[in-house]
Image (cartoon, rainbow, N blue to C red):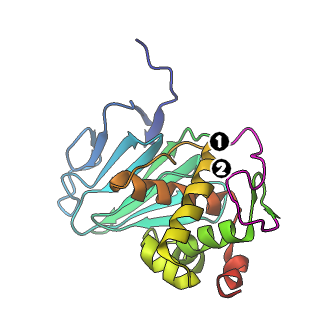
Amino acid sequence: MSDDRPQLAIDFIGEEYVVDHDRPLTFGRSGDLVIDDNQHLHRRLGQFSFADGMWWLHNVGSALTIEVVDRNSPSRLTVVPGATAALVFEEAAVRFHAGSTNYELTIDVPIARPSVVSPADEADQDGAATVTGRELTFTPDQLRCIIALAEPRLVDPSRVDLPTNKAAAARLGWKITKFNRKLDNVCNKVDAAGVQGLRGGTDSLATRRRERLVDFAVTSSIVSAADLPMLDS
């Protein structure tokens, strides 16, 4: 059966590469995409892969940092060694340097966009008034749930780490059961709007679900640094 899902497109100094969903692509001094024979460059610095409905960049090196820069806005992400980041910019530059040499890959990322507006409060039973986002509607508590997870990113856009659910619940003064219920409601709502990567269980998939939610909420301007005071309200 043919796979007609959009593929990840990469350009490196005029050479084009296409990454299939079922075959990750590595790059560095060796690997699938050979960057350079620069001895300061890792043999394998990074890897592009597809999982949970979206594309990911893994920094598989031990010393070099990778930067992902949105080509259409000032937004950027820093991916430190050992870290993984969701590719949430549709047109991005992947930059890194080894020794005295700078390198850049340009990538085009197929990203699912919400095509419908989810009805407000169909999953929440607390009777709270709704707050309207850019394309979806959320209760104040649902927004606080998102903001608590996104707080490190909203304070420092280069960060990719997230607080644990327990830490986010404590930040809000909630019981963990309440936080988990709100998070499930939010993820179900965004998933229903057509955003992929939000179906997870209790293992690592749940962590990626939270990463996908934060990436979508921040890049879609559903939450911003101006919303941080809601954490203390």
Are the residues tagged 2 and 1 within 8 Å (C-beta)? Answer: yes
User: What is the secondary structure assignment of the residue under circle 2?
Assistant: helix
- Whether residue 133 is situated above or below residue 176 in the rendered picture: above
Q: Residue at x 60, y 70 (%)?
A: 145
Percent position of residue 220, x then y: 68, 57
Q: Which residue is identified by label 2?
A: 189
- Whether residue 13 is situated above or below residue 136 in the rendered picture: above
Residue range in magenta is: 113-129
Percent position of residue 139, x then y: 74, 65
Q: Residue at x 58, y 47 (%)?
A: 91
Instruction: Sort mark 2 into few (<14), some (14-19) or many (20+) by Cα contacts within 10 Å.
Output: many
Percent position of residue 43, x then y: 18, 52
Q: Residue 141 vs residue 25: left or right?
A: right
Tag of residue 192: 1
Q: Quadrant of residue 132?
A: bottom right
State the residue in front, 95 or 76.
76
